[in-house]
Amino acid sequence: MSSKQQHLDTLGEIRDLMNRSSRFVSLSGLSGVCAGVFALAGAAAAYLYLGGDLFFGLEVFGPDSRADYHTIRLAEKMREMDFYSFMLLDAGLVLLCALLSGTYFTWRRARRAGAKLWDETSRRLLVQLFVPLAAGGLFCIFLLLHGQAALLAPATLVFYGIGLFSAAKYTFNDVQYLGLCQIGLGLIGLVFPVYGLLLWALGFGVLHIVYGGVMYYRYERNKQQ
Amino acid sequence: MSNYLHQLNKAFENRSRLGIMSVLAVNERVDFNRLKELLDLTDGNLASHLTALERENYIEVQKQFIGKKPNTSYLLTDAGRAAFRSHLDALEAMLREMR
């Protein structure tokens, strides 16, 4: 029995070293949840900007409501800005907040596990993720230059999905399913560009939250107790 | 069970050596400091295990300069990969019989 346990321990050690040396396992599910929340906020801002009239109805807040006043002020400001700078600001803010919060939670998880945030595995993970993302970024710039703004949302989904799919082999395998779902949503968006923003909110928002939540409960919550 | 005992590789009896092989099995090449960090070994300890594995012709050493710093990295040879695999197979077979 003890010899069996010994062999099992040995195999466990081998597996642990293989994982630790080739996969970045500190990626936190909470990073995904945060990214999703910021994405939903960004999508809501874009929705207000694009179809804001729906939310201006005085009957919603009442004429004297402060909330109403602020909503109108915000909407007026948004209207003063031109479409492209608004979209860039919105997307940029979402990206920045998602990256900062994502880095924070992943850093926290790495610190608790006594692992490093920046090592060979996180470097490989980021290369796999950012090569498709950089290509996607340039692709989107050219979409804009050619006046195809409606295809932006689905294009970002597709390229992000490809990035996740390729990065999955350097972190949790589950990430590849998230990637496939993002690619799928993006392709649907290319067929029906009208639903672009909705699909974007679904992919970057809801899927991130669901995925991050599942990952958190599956891999992190129990280990802390 | 004794059938499998002789298939367990003597060179991998040591945990650190098995650890080195495990890391190299899933990474194309790994440098000295990274191995030290992953296995939590001292310089001298790691170096002696690496030398032993190199003597068995299981790993290959590559020395190069990155800028002006010398950098030593290690990779599995085909013989090393085969030996590691059959060691794992033997472990697996033994566990199966004990069940």
Image (cartoon, rainbow, N blue to C red):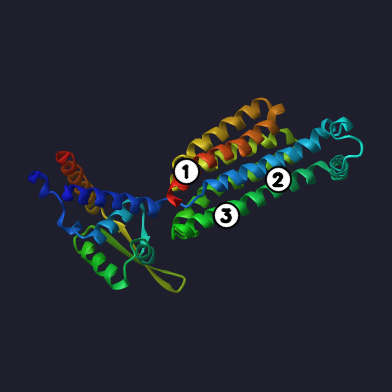
Quick one: label 2 or label 1, which is nearer the N terminus?
A: 2
Rendered image: mark on residue A103: 3
Residue drawn at 11 percent across, 49 percent down: B5
Q: Amino acid under label 1?
A: Ala
Residue drawn at 17 percent across, 50 percent down: A2
Residue placed furthest toward the right: A63
Q: Nearer the viewer, residue A125 or A201?
A: A201
Quick one: label 2 or label 3, which is nearer the N terminus?
A: 2
Residue placed furthest toward the left: B2
Q: Which residue is mark 2?
A: A91
Q: Amino acid under label 2?
A: Ala
Circle 1: element type: helix
Q: Nearer the viewer, residue B20 or A132?
A: B20
Residue A75 position, x and y percent, is 85, 41
Q: Mark 3 and 1 residues: CB-CB less than 8 Å, in contact?
A: no
Residue A46 position, x and y percent, is 75, 39
Q: Is residue A188 left or right of residue B68?
A: right
Q: Is residue A43 left or right of residue A175?
A: right
Q: Mark 2 and 3 residues: CB-CB less than 8 Å, in contact?
A: no
Circle 2: element type: helix
Residue B32 position, x and y percent, is 35, 66
Q: Which residue is mark 1?
A: A168
Residue drawn at 73 percent across, 38 percent down: A44
- Reply above or below: A114 against A137: below
**Tag 1: Cα neighbours inside 10 Å, few (<14), some, or many (≥20)?**
many
Q: Amino acid under label 3?
A: Thr
How far apart marks 2 and 1 lie (CA) works out to: 24 Å
Q: Is residue B10 visible?
A: yes
- Reply above or below: B94 against B37: above
Rendered image: mark on residue A127: none
